[in-house]
Image (cartoon, rainbow, N blue to C red):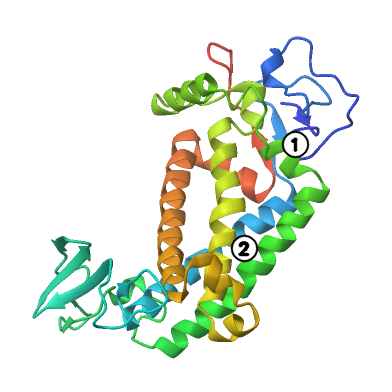
Amino acid sequence: MTETTGTPDEGVADDVSPPTDAPAETFPEAEAFAAPVHGGDIVKRHRLSTRLWHWTNALALFVMLLSGLMIFNAHPRLYWGQYGANFDTAWFEIGSHGNEGFAKLGALQVKTTGLLGAWPDVHGVIQHRAFPYWLTIPSTYSLAHARLWHLAFAWILAIGLIGYLIISLVNRHVQRDLAPTREEIAPSHIWRDIKDHARLRFPTGAAAARYNILQKLSYGAVLFVFLPLIVLTGLTMSPQMDSGWSFLLDIFGGRQSARSIHFIVAWLLVGFFFVHVAMVVLAGPFNEVRSMITGRYRLPQEKGAQP
């Protein structure tokens, strides 16, 4: 198969015309290929900066999530407003009554014995903490060590995010590959894409080399909403940052509100991760993972095409 070098994440000259035998919607105005590409061809799909940030970000979020769960174990309740203490009303709580664990959301309470609130350790002894040892860093209770892990990787996340955004704006990856076109944001187009994904009808041929509208919207939400919120709410929970950047408390409605938002966004990112992994598996894990390691991607064959 041929190898094409002018795919969306690599960039090509503006005056290069799209292949004449490809449908117009396959090549938006900001995207073009140096030569016609077809299903089965190997193309360059991801820049080095994208690949490095992807794996660094994945590691940072993994460590921050598990260390964050240990930090949550120190006070497994969430509040709205400026303050929050043991006798204030929590909107979310994980706890136990005797040896029975529970998770409580508002007035709704669910038994979680054995998983959350009350669970057996490696020796079979019932422990009374929100999240079990196999879901936390470190696995033994230590708020101090959890904070060290969390803050160390928070720096990696924040610096990596800022660096990636700067690079992506300079090389026009954001403008060219992530910004939806006018046709893509039409409700009919979005609904068609949703139906295609629900039926596991993924793009093939040259269309598979660029992001579809659902990818653009979800990646854009992660890049410009969820990750900045994680960083900013994390800063708001720091007393030292509050003394210098007190406006953060006003933006998020207090330290406890920032903690709640931090927790919610963290689980939204977990949800994104599971959907992302499911799509990778359904679309072909070897090809998808290889493209995020080497940058090279084999375009899926068009329906009815000869292999």
| Quadrant of res 301 | top right
Nearer mark to the viewer, of 1 and 2: 1
Whether tag 1 and tag 2 are in contact, CB under 8 A, the answer is: no
Comparing 195 with 134, the one in front is: 195
Left/right placement of residue 276 relative to residue 208 reads left
Mark number, residue 176: 1
Comparing 188 with 130, the one in front is: 188
* 142 w.r.t. 46: above or below: below
User: Would residue 201 be seen by someone viewing this image from the given angle?
Assistant: no
Left/right placement of residue 234 relative to residue 42 reads left
Q: CA distance from mark 1 to mark 2?
A: 23 Å
User: Would residue 170 be seen by someone viewing this image from the given angle?
Assistant: yes
Dot 1 or dot 2: first in sequence order is: 2
* 106 w.r.t. 289: above or below: below
Q: Quadrant of the C terminus?
A: top right
| Quadrant of res 10 | top right
**In this figure, which residue is indicated by the disc labeled 2?**
56
Q: Residue at x 72, y 55 (%)?
A: 165
Q: Amino acid at mark 2?
A: Thr
